[in-house]
Structure formats: structure tokens, C-alpha cells
Image (tube, rainbow, N blue to C red):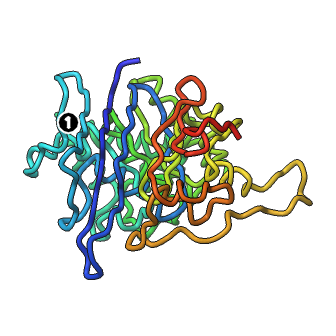
Amino acid sequence: MNRLLDVENLTLQFDTDEGRITAVDNVSFTLGAGEVMGLVGESGSGKSVTAKSLMKLNPDNAIYGDETKIILHLDGGPVDIMSLHTSSDLKVIRGGAISMIFQEPMASFAPAITIGNQMVEQLQIHTDMTAKKAQELSIEMLARVGISDASTRFKQFAFELSGGMRQRAMIAMALSTKPKLLIADEPTTALDVTIQAQVIDLMKDLVSEFGMGIIFITHDLGVIAQTADSVAVMYLGRLVEQGPVREVIRTPAHPYTKGLIAALPQLDDLDVPLTPIPGDIPSPLERPPGCVFNTRCAVAIEGLCTREIPLFTQVAQKHQVACHLYSEGDDK
């Protein structure tokens, strides 16, 4: 599988009125062409900030680490995303080689411009399509994501559509340029299960048809299990476990990953009580030293987990975990 994306030592901080906070801390991963990677974790883990970094969409108060490298491998050669600064330079990745489905669809559409005009405009910016061809493709994509009477919806404004329909229109818009990398931030949250299945099938079709890579951000481990090839688990700005999706879900190694899976409802036994992870995710202003999960971990090693940041240890083929239990030789 050809490499599509290399992220090395991604560190991102923000200057705020309360002080400088670390949102992403030394995150590294690779993505192959045609691969779907799931990025999971609780709200506040840094998933969306990580995704926006790949398109340099974070606000002006964002400060990237000196060692941060983000390389996108395109047909014309590698693109060093961190070296792109001007609007014309960034156009290569923003909506062109990379598209993003945002979590809130209403904020992604201009309220005074029809859905169709926005879809046609972006196609004409990033391709050499005529207006007629762009309109035909836009209507086709709206229909492919399950929007009925797509030619009529094409002429409507975002506020005239339901929440789920806006979400589908945004997905259609992101997919219409056939990007090399699609970042999907909770793309199925507002959809019922039938449309959710249609959208997931569409993404899979585009992966096989165009070799597109996808970073799929979600809280739904069930969707990840059915959609992704690999999964990365994130907590308070750090990756704590990554590997093949079925390997990680069937045999989770990190206590946090185990907690996420244990918290899922068991449909085969509805009498089993839910098991939430105790405590709350700390504020980025109060990042704990050592392992960032130590304040909520039931098996933390006293004097070690609170002092030293764990390095990744390989527990199976392509399956890594950042936990002192494994660096100490424990396989619990």
C-alpha cells in the first residue's frame, strides 16, 4: 500500500487568556492510499484539532511544535503542509487534495447562497469543470448520499433542509472533488441508521474506486469496527494505542481503550449495567504529568505513571500501546 500521509511529532498549543495550553502532544501516524483510519476518544481528546492541523485550519493563536512534520504524498510529488502559508498555496490541500466533513453542517454552508451554487463554485475552483458539468456532478452526488429529489434540493438553501439532510449535503460536497484524503469528523452523528449505512457504503465505494484515504473521527466504536482498517485511540492530546481495528477492539491493551469498550451497551445482554470510565477528562490547562491517563487509571503504577511519559511498545503485529504496564513487561 502506497503511503498517502505522514504525520510526525505533531504538537499544537494555543495561547489563551488563561495561558498557553497543549491541545496535541507529539502525535505521529501514517495513512496509506485506500486506507481508512479511525480516530477515537472522548470529547476534548484533541481529535478535531489534529484533523484540522492537516489542512492548517486552526485559528491564528495556534502554535505548532518545531519538530512537527506533515507530508501529503500526491501524484506530482510530496507536499510539505507545514511549509504552506499563503491562500493560493493552501488551496492545493483545502478542498482540493484534502476535503473535510465538519461536525456541524449548518456552520459549513453560507446561509444566503444555495447548496447547489456552493457545490458548483468549489468544483470550479478545484477542477476545470464547466458550470453545467459541475451542476450535473453535484446533483449526482446529492442523490448518492441518499437525498431524494436531488435536483430540487440543489436549488435550496441550507436552512430549508433538515439537520440530517444538511449533513448529507455536506458529505456530498466534500466527496464531489474526489479528494486524495477525506477527513470525516463525526459524519454520521445526525443520521438515522439507514442513511448512516448508505453514507458508509458510499465512502467505502470511493476508497476502492479512487484509492482515497479516510481519517474517520467518531465516538461510535461500532461504526469504526465496520468501516476502518486501523484505529488510533487518543486521550488528552496524546495517542495511547494504535493498530489494526479488529486487533485493538478484540484485544485492547491500554486501560483507556478497555474502558471505552467496557462502556458500550451490550445488546446481547440488556441487563448488564453500563460501566463508565471513572472521573472526567482533565482540562488542557491542568495536564497531569507522566501518563495523561493516570488520574483516571485503576492500574496506574505509583511513582512511575505520574512521573514518566510512556513510550509506545509493540504488543502484536502493527499493534502498539503507550502504557507503562507493557514497558514493564506486564501483559495484563
- Determine whether, in the image, residue 57 is placed left or right of residue 257: left
Horizontal and vertical percent position of residue 130: 19, 37
* Residue bearing mark 1: 127
> On the image, which quarter does residue 107 sit in?
bottom left
* Quadrant (top left/top right/bottom left/bottom right) for the N terminus: top left
Horizontal and vertical percent position of residue 58: 26, 60
Between 72 and 115, the one lying in front of the other is: 72
222 vs 161: above or below:
above
* Quadrant (top left/top right/bottom left/bottom right) for the C terminus: top right
Amino acid tagged 1: Thr
Q: Mark 1: few, some, or many residues within 10 Å (few <14, many ≥20)?
A: few
* Residue at disc 1, secondary structure: loop
Instruction: Residue lying at the far bottom in this picture: please name it.
Output: 17
- Determine whether, in the image, residue 301 is placed left or right of residue 51: right
Horizontal and vertical percent position of residue 129: 20, 35
Q: Residue at x 47, y 65 (%)?
A: 44
Instruction: Residue lying at the far top in this picture: please name it.
Output: 1
Horizontal and vertical percent position of residue 57: 25, 56
Between 2 and 148, the one lying in front of the other is: 2
